[in-house]
Image: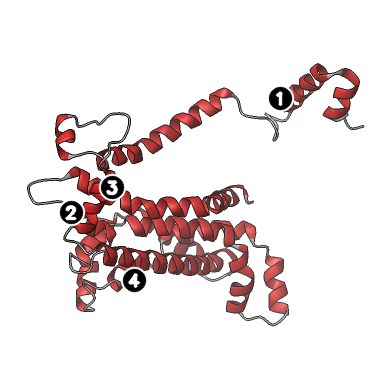
């Protein structure tokens, strides 16, 4: 016989008995799915939020100050200054093509995100649902490449791009980033548990080809994890500075490379540089506002599947 519900207990024995029963059931369920977190949880989460948000706020403080104020006090006051819009105007008036750099970053980020999602999902589907010789060692090799620092491959990669006459071209940034080892690993783990073999067999029985099965069955099933991968890839591409600064240079820069040009040889105008950083952060903040819920859903879907 099942235990009475909490509303029934409240009607028959009062609110105190209902609260006691709720606490007892929460302890019996290891905390219970409906149990609200305590003040300690909120305190820890609030501390993490403040620690994570402080660098952004400090950047805003520097961007809204003057060089004289920073020279007198390297750590500005609690409230931002009043020079933010004038410093932003100085960024637009600087000797850099900010519009072109922003467009280059947008093109690189969008193309890279789409390609990483497509090819990583395709590879993940192959590793998780197809049976072929050497599948396990090949997957281990792909994952092992994540341990190799990017800096070790810069010299040969630059030589290849130079031989292909792609230096200074956006393709030199897009081509090496069209698929990532993390993306392959992430989609392999997700599809292994999220996509049942019965759906694949049903598609094969209906006469669908292998690629048709991937496009119509595997790709829609991987949508939550693919959305998370796309967002992270977009952020990584948007903020990438190391490789674009080497292969593109100052003639056709992305936004991080263009912001580096704001720094003079022997003098750093911190308000000007930080105002440029604020401009580069705004698209990412808008992206999180628009797609933040999808990002959390993708992370949770990848974490609880299985």
Residue 85 image label: 3
Helix, strand or loop under label 4? helix
Residue 200 image label: none
In percent of width and height, residue 259 lies at 23, 55
Residue at screen point 67% across, 29% down:
31
Residue 175 image label: 4
Structural crowding at the residue carrying mark 3, measured as other residues with C-alpha within 10 Å and reported as few (<14), some (14–19) or many (≥20): few
Residue at screen point 21% across, 67% down:
247
Q: Is residue 153 visible?
A: no
In percent of width and height, residue 223 lies at 58, 62
- Mark 2 or 4: in front is 2
Outermost residue on the left side: it is 266
Q: Which residue is mark 2?
A: 262
Give the CA distance from mark 2 to mark 3. 17 Å
Give the CA distance from mark 1 to mark 3. 54 Å
- Mark 2 or 1: in front is 2
Give the CA distance from mark 2 to mark 1. 58 Å
| Label whose residue precedes the other's in the sequence (4 or 1) | 1
Give the CA distance from mark 3 to mark 4. 37 Å
- Mark 3 or 4: in front is 3
């Amino acid at each position: 016989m099942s235990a009475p519900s909490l509303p029934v207990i409240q009607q028959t024995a009062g609110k105190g008995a209902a609260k006691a029963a709720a606490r007892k059931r929460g302890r019996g369920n290891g905390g219970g799915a409906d149990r609200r977190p305590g003040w300690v949880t909120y305190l820890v989460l609030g501390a993490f939020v403040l620690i994570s948000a402080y660098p952004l706020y400090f950047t805003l403080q520097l961007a809204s100050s003057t060089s004289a104020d920073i020279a007198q006090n390297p750590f500005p006051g609690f409230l931002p200054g009043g020079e933010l819009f004038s410093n932003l105007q100085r960024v637009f008036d600087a000797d850099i093509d900010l519009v072109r750099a922003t467009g280059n970053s947008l093109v690189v980020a969008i193309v890279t995100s789409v390609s990483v999602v497509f090819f990583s999902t395709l590879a993940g589907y192959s590793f998780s649902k197809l049976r072929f010789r050497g599948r396990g060692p090949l997957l281990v090799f792909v994952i092992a490449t994540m341990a190799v620092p990017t800096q070790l491959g810069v010299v040969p990669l630059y030589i290849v791009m130079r031989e292909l006459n792609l230096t200074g071209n956006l393709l030199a940034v897009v081509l090496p980033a069209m698929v990532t080892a993390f993306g392959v690993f992430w989609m392999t783990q997700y599809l292994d548990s999220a996509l049942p073999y019965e759906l694949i067999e049903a598609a094969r029985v209906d006469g669908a080809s292998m690629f048709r099965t991937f496009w119509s069955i595997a790709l829609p099933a991987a949508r939550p994890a693919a959305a998370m991968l796309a967002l992270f890839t977009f952020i990584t591409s948007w903020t990438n500075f190391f490789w674009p600064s080497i292969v593109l240079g100052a003639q056709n820069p992305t936004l991080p490379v263009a912001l580096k040009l704001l720094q003079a040889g022997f003098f750093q105008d911190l308000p000007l540089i930080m105002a440029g950083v604020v401009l580069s952060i705004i698209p990412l903040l808008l992206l999180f506002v628009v797609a933040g819920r999808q990002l959390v859903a993708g992370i949770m879907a990848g974490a609880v599947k299985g």
